Amino acid sequence: MEVYLKTVLRQADTILFIGSGISQWSGLPSWVGMMRELAEFLEEHGIDAEIVRRESRTGDLLQAASYGFDRLTTYQIGEFLHKACRVSIAAPHEIHRRLIALGPRCFITTNYDHLIEDSLRRWCPDRYFRVVINRQLTETAEIVQARSLDFVFKLHGDVDDSGSIVLTREQYRALLSDGDLHHALETARILLASRPVVYLGFGLRDPDFLYVRDLLANTYKGGVRDHYALMADVSVAEVDYWRRNYGIHLLSYPTAERIDGSRGHDALIGVLVCSTGWR
């Protein structure tokens, strides 16, 4: 499988699908961390946050976000997102440089921050990458063309456009067939069905990846699919399940426990080096 991954990572039309785990290298929170920060933000504004904490403890992160955002004004939501995305503070990490140096020139991300765009401007200054946000009808229609390259498709919106954000259960519904953002989901579906894809920065329980799973379930008819996901600490049973049911080849890398009890993902860089031969 590693041989096929190397081939895919050399192709310009391959899509790198980037999740929140990549932004964490630059100090941004995980899904769980963002809900914790949302609860703290509510309390800073004199709003009881117990319902957000309760839903987070049960693992229903989308509902936690829904309850939290329901108590905030549009301005406050924008303020919270800028704070959570560390706008004007976070900078691209070494992991971003290594991703940009790979062969693919097409990116989809569920992240709201600008770290991918900043990375491309810093380490690929001679090439222009179009940034396409989910609310842009014309642009989303254009990037599904077979020869389309050099784009960053922000499926769940951009921190500077609060109306584009997809974070709560209600906002996810906007991507459904009768929703205002369904064209964006259809764009993602076409791209995932027609291109090789490598997923990075996701976990098997991430709400964003579970949504992608459901999207893939409607297009996978068996057979071979050039979809690969680099994920931490997955089991043999999980590898087999995802390959058979969704056509995604999981490549596992080990994490190591840090002094503070968190898990370190340093091995991911080693996996990229081994998979590409790029150092």
Image: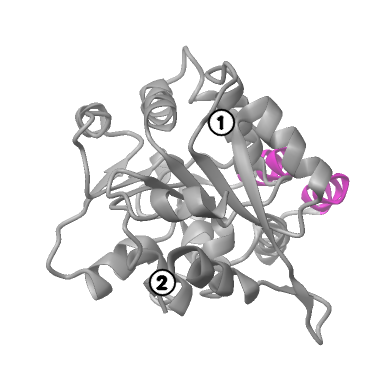
How many other residues sit within 10 Å of disc 1, few (<14), some (14-19) or many (≥20)? some
Q: Quadrant of residue 126?
A: bottom left
What residue is disc 2 on?
Answer: 98
Q: Which residue is painted at 57% across and 57% down in the image? A: 201
Task: State the predominant SS element of the stretch in magenta.
Answer: helix
What residue is disc 1 on?
Answer: 172
- Sequence-wise, the earlier of marks 2 and 1 is 2
How many other residues sit within 10 Å of disc 2, few (<14), some (14-19) or many (≥20)? some
Q: Which residue is painted at 53% across and 63% down in the image? A: 22
**Location of the C terminus (image quadrant):** bottom left
Q: Outermost residue, top direction?
A: 178
Q: Which residue is painted at 81% across and 87% down in the image? A: 259
Answer yes or no: is residue 248 visible: yes
Does residue 250 sit above or below 248 in this rendering? Answer: below
What secondary structure is marked by label 1?
Answer: helix
Q: Which residues are magenta?
A: 50-69
Q: Outermost residue, front direction?
A: 3
Q: Quadrant of residue 113?
A: bottom left
